[in-house]
Amino acid sequence: MLSRRAILFSSAALWGCRSRKATPYLGYCFVADQESHSLAVADLSTFRTWHSIALPDAPTAVLAHPHHSKVFALAGATGTIFEIDVASLAISRHARAGTNAVSMQFDPDGNAIWVLYREPAALVEFPCDALRSRRQLALGMPPDGFNISPNRRAAIASNAGQSVLIASLDRTAVENTVRLAAAPSLVSFQQKGLQIIAASHSAQNLTIIEAVSGRVLVVLPVPIRPRHFCFSADEGQLFVTGQGRDAVVIVYPYTTEIGETILAGRSPAGMAVVNNILLVTNPETNTVTALDIDTRKLLAVIEVGQEPREILITPDNQYALVLDQKSGDLAVIRVAALTGRDWVRRYKSAPLFTVIPVGRKPVSAAVVRLA
């Protein structure tokens, strides 16, 4: 009796016989395995697990340095950043400035990492050259998420404070505290940093804020409880998923209005955009839904591992990498297989390229190109 994974591999092999041979990507995918307290390293040139890096704490996020062969893993509970040297595949340095870290993000130049802490409530800068905490932005309320704009501002959402804090990274100071009608659960800059969009899970709305003045421009009700954001390549469209409907809500940021709502499989969650295709994970059905952004039509449904949550795209736009949390896999989708095939157009289905085992609970990943 064939296993489900064997069927997936056989379908990938069959598809490979019918289509142009895929080009391997010369790089690694570092996957944060929360339950195993480790980083799995998948070799994307062979599509196999290459190495595992043990960490003292459970990683919750991982980022690849934009200019150097380094990877940074964040352990949320202890608030520790671990620097991984790609050449040696080992921990080279670590640092911390608090506990209960929410998330981390590079500054626009890639010279420093900013980490958002709940204890104490602060946004802390870690320069990459020294990896020691330098500047700290104290917050007057517990934070739940943040985003950094190209013009070096930070938008920080506080559910308990029912506010969005707008801060200058250069001055390390809060410029505006925007009190909202409902607690924000998600925040992101748009229009190259000119505006901020805050999502409220409880109130089912999106609030658009002018970044410089902190003025609320509009509050848009949505038919879902928003949990995930994803922008189109030109940032002209914002895609939103969340509980409430099996659909993606499309927002037009430049006109500050809701465009439409389109079906996107069962309980859509994480998203990614590649080659004008919107990929949406469906954890309840173990699938990924591919939609044409221009026509809004369904391109294909791809069966992956159990409970897919997040998607990232390789820098060459050739592969979509799906984190399957329950089965502990990295499902690899070849982007070229989603369009231009009679079989895909007819049956609205595309084969999975391959599956790479990466641990017990993959929660975040980053791709590093090898020189």
Image (cartoon, rainbow, N blue to C red):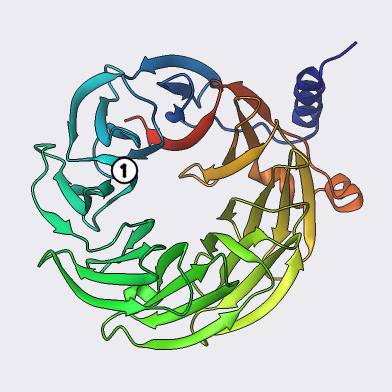
Q: Quadrant of the N terminus?
A: top right
Going by the picture, which residue comes out furthest to the top? 1
Counting other residues with Cα less than 10 Å from the Cα at mark 1, is it few (<14), some (14-19), or many (20 or more)? many
**Residue 196 at x, y percent in the picture:** 39, 74
Q: How many marks?
A: 1
Residue depicted at x 64% and y 29%: 326
Which of the pair 23/112 is nearer the observer?
112
For residue 173, side relative to residue 292 (left or right): left
Q: Quadrant of the C terminus?
A: top left
Which of the pair 42/35 is nearer the observer?
35
**Residue 254 at x, y percent in the picture:** 48, 84
Going by the picture, which residue comes out furthest to the front? 160
Instruction: Read off the residue under disc 1.
Output: 101
In terms of image quadrants, where is residue 69?
A: top left
Residue depicted at x 41% and y 36%: 60
Residue depicted at x 58% and y 72%: 203
**Residue 145 at x, y percent in the picture:** 38, 57
From where the camera sits, is residue 234 visible?
A: no
Callout 1: SS: strand
Callout 1, which amino acid?
Answer: Ala
For residue 252, side relative to residue 89 (left or right): right
Q: Is residue 112 above or below residue 360?
A: below
Residue depicted at x 82% and y 16%: 3
Which of the pair 3/247 is nearer the observer?
247
From where the camera sits, is residue 53 visible?
A: yes
In terms of image quadrants, where is residue 11?
A: top right
**Residue 180 at x, y percent in the picture:** 42, 78
